[in-house]
Image (spheres, grey):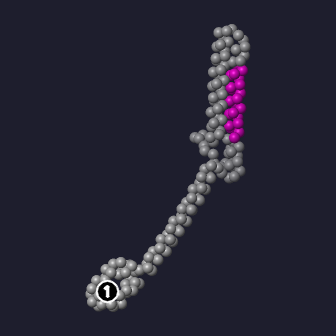
Amino acid sequence: MIKYKCIHCGVELETEDSLNGAQEPCPECKQMNSVPRSKVSVTSLKQAVRARLGDIVQELRASEEEAQRVRQAQIAQPKKDDAGMSNTESALGTIGGIYIVVGVIAALVLISVGADKKEPLYFALGAMAAASGILSATLLFAVKWILHYLRRIAKAVEGGEEKP
């Protein structure tokens, strides 16, 4: 409640905090008076604002903590392609395919050069290039599938999915 005196007749007046700064008639002389601004209401307003700001800060901290947990979970789980392979496994498969293509192209070039020059060394080098490309790719594909199944077994042990 705000207490003040009528500026016209001096009668003690009392009004609600909600009329802070409003115009109100005096019940005695019927003249209009400005209800003074209350320090109590400003203080209570500050307290309410501080309390709300404290709530907002807590909500922001909770949101940031949740975002941090999500980021950590995303980092912990490797991204997967459509076949359920991680990026590492997919990259190994891609590199293996490139080895095959490069080996076969090198073999074709060396064999065609060997055919033009009629040198058996180029034929042998061509065959070795093709064999090394295919062997490298085979090893990479094997590593890729071993990684894939090891991840599936680890998930099964953790209870994430069925064993392969």
Against 126, residue 40 (above or below) is below
Helix, strand or loop for disc 1: loop
Quarter containing the N terminus: bottom left
Indicate the quadrant where residue 117 lies. top right
Amino acid under disc 1: Ile
How packed is label 1: few (under 14 Cα within 10 Å), some, or many (20 or more)?
few
Q: Residue 15 at what x, y percent from top left?
A: 37, 84
How many circles with numbers are drawn on the protein? 1
Q: Is residue 85 visible?
A: no
Q: Is residue 116 visible?
A: yes
- Which residue occupies 47% across, 73% down? 46
Q: Residue 135 at what x, y percent from top left?
A: 71, 27
- Which residue occupies 71% across, 25% down? 132
**Magenta segment: does it hold 128?**
yes
Against 138, residue 15 (above or below) is below
- Which residue occupies 59% across, 52% down? 71
Q: Which residue is mark 1?
A: 7
Q: Residue 42 at what x, y percent from top left?
A: 44, 76
Q: Magenta: predominant secondary structure element?
A: helix
Horizontal side, residue 158 vs residue 27: left or right: right
Horizontal side, residue 69 vs residue 138: left or right: left
Query: What segment carries the magenta color?
Result: 127-147
Comparing 101 with 37, the one in front is 37
Which residue is situated farthest in the left direction here?
30
Comparing 95 with 157, the one in front is 95
Indicate the quadrant where residue 37 lies. bottom left
Q: Residue 99 at what x, y percent from top left?
A: 66, 28
Indicate the quadrant where residue 108 lies. top right
